[in-house]
Image (spheres, rainbow, N blue to C red):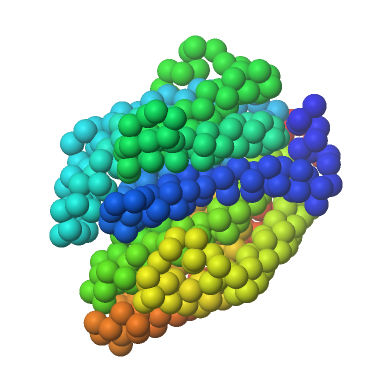
Amino acid sequence: MENTKMAEMPIRKLMLSMGIPMIISMVLQAVYNIVDSAFVSNMAVGGEQALNALTLAFPMQILMVAVGIGTGVGANVLTAKNLGAGDTEKASRAAGNAEFMAAVIYAVFLIFGLFGTDMYIGSQTTDPEAARMGADYLRICSVLSFGMSFFAIYEKLLQATGHSMYSTIAQIAGAVTNIVLDPIMIYGWLGLPEMGVKGAAYATVIGQIVSFVLALIFHRKVNTVIKNKPEYLKPDLRIIKQIYSVGLPAIISQALISVMTYGMNLILGNISADAVTAYGLFYKVMQFLLFAAFGMRDAIMPITAFSYGMGDSDRIRDSVKYGQFYTFIIMLAGTLALELFAEPFSAVFGLSGVTNDLCVSAMRIISLSFVFAGANIAFQGVFQALGAGVSSLLISLGRQLIFVFPFALMFAGMAGERAENAWLVWITFPIAEVLTAVVAVILHARIMRTRVAERCAKNAQIAFSGGVK
């Protein structure tokens, strides 16, 4: 029984058994954009403009992923908490309402894809060819985004019940589909027409649809603890509010990546287009590390939420301890890898001299912030699991907005319009992560002292009096 596993397996083992598949799953999400970038950069004609086009589309893609994943996170925590408290009815209603919201989310991005892509891409560039390719790519990804929206929900529901391996299988299948189709559709292999960036977009959405279909099948087959009754799809404003009390901070947290990337594109654009391209490519490489931390965060959340529903303070503390430890190991390994192999990683994209130098310097300077970034991301997972969504949001605002733009603007001013000086802006990120980590430690101590202590004391009192949690 998965509930027994969640309640009784030692946290250090449970965190690994759930975390490893989740890490693989999240890292594979980073594959989509970076694989597209690698293939389009090697197009015979217009490769550099195509690469710039994908960089311009990237912030909106992150926003789309943010809304889907954030909704899934809210459903994950609410489902796991109710299962921990033994209430399968509420858990099932949470799952059904999350499915309903996936349809709403898709409708919103469908409308954006039909009417908003040209204006959005045009706000970032004056290059007509890059604008055209960026709008084409983003339009396809938006109009056919239903696979991404629904997969985000079923992935988190599988994780909430301890079936993270199945969500990983679905994610792997989608990523492999994307990788196989990219060169076929971009370059026109196997008798297909050469579609360029449109081919990259179609390969991406087909991969997402494959992941969605498999995740839906797995959800129906193995998530037997969750009842899939049609009436559970009927929107319940109370349940939706509970989902987004955790999910909205998670959405904002993910969406701030989009805001930060868009803002950095504008700031770096005042220095040079080379700096924009270098930052965009670095961020896609860095996504592998950040998404690995997100994967561990996604293991921390259901485990901590389940323990919180049980009112078990020891398992809550172990969730924090082992979650932070494993995240630290991941981010330290990533830091060492980028410090040692920055030049080979950058060479994959065939960049020119200045752009290549800036990309390498970004890897070597910004990677110094990874350990602190990992700690902040892990704390966000803990805060979300304990229902402290506002605290999680504060961490996101700190590391992606409050402590970023002031320093970025200052360092950009020092760099002037000299592309070779753009490396000064990279210093922003270690500063922002360290300052945010200080805030996170303070918030964590307060939450453990108040929210967790009160919950566990209440459960102990109920158990002592012979009641039910």
**Can the viewer see residue 85 in this picture?**
no
User: Which residue is at a point 26% across and 48% down the rendered structure image?
Assistant: 134
Q: Is residue 274 left or right of residue 83?
A: left
Percent across and percent down for residue 1 are 80, 27
In the depicted structure, whether residue 99 falls above or below residue 13: above
In this orientation, does residue 275 appear?
yes
Q: What's the residue at 65%, 72% (across, down)?
A: 336
Quarter of the image containing the C terminus? top right
Residue sitting at 41 percent across and 57 percent down? 257
**Residue sitting at x 40%, y 80%:** 423
Q: Is residue 131 above or below residue 442?
A: above
> Is residue 372 positioned above or below 431 on the image?
above
Vertical arrangement, residue 214 with respect to residue 438, above or below:
above
Is 412 in front, or is 207? 207
Report whether 351 appears left or right of 134.
right
Task: Name the foreground residue: 142 vs 356.
Answer: 356
| In the displayed structure image, the side of residue 341 where residue 429 appears, left or right | left
